[in-house]
Amino acid sequence: MHIGELAERTGLSLRTLRHYDEIGLLTPSDRTDGGFRLYTAADESRLLLIRRMKPLGYSLEQMGELLVVIDGLEADPADALLQERLDTIKEEALERRDRLRKQLAAAEEFVDQLHARQASPY
């Protein structure tokens, strides 16, 4: 698929996809004779993984580190060091998710308080 279709399917901008290509986070699988980027379903899956990391506050560098681990484990599933690193990343992701849940709960309480104040003048 072309970059526009990938952008539409993932909800990311063309600018973001080009930036990811420039920094090596998501390289197109191929290019047309005219030089246009071409992506596969595997590229889309990789991009969705990257997109899911953003709300958890991962930096682009951390995203790249995870992708290196994933690529390494695809090449050698028995690599104990890479598996250990993946386990650490999973633990960090759970901690980040729990922090977000607490923030969301606090935000919901705040909104509830605002709604309650609308019902009464004070």
Image (spheres, grey):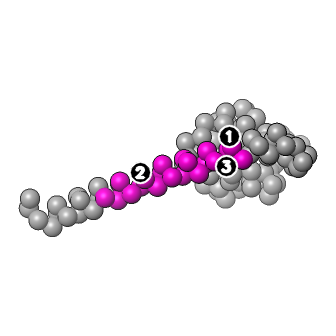
Q: Is residue 30 magenta?
A: no
Local packing at callout 1 (Cα closer than 10 Å; few below 14, some 14-19, many 20+) is some
Does residue 109 show up?
yes
Q: Classify residue 6 as left or right of residue 75.
A: left
Which residue is located at x 65 percent, y 55 percent?
Answer: 10
Q: Classify residue 57 as left or right of residue 22.
A: left
Image disc number at residue 103:
2
Residue for badge 3: 90
Task: Look at label 1 and name its amino acid.
Answer: Met
> Which marked residue is nearer to the observer: mark 1 or mark 2?
2
Task: Look at label 2 and name its amino acid.
Answer: Gln
Which residue is located at x 63 percent, y 41 percent?
Answer: 16
Q: Which residues are magenta?
A: 87-109
Which residue is located at x 72 percent, y 47 percent?
Answer: 87
Q: Secondary structure at mark 2?
A: helix
Q: Position of residue 72 (x, y in %)?
A: 85, 42
For marks 3 and 1, give the CA distance.
Answer: 13 Å
Residue closest to the eye, 92 or 27: 92
Q: Is residue 10 above or below residue 27?
A: below
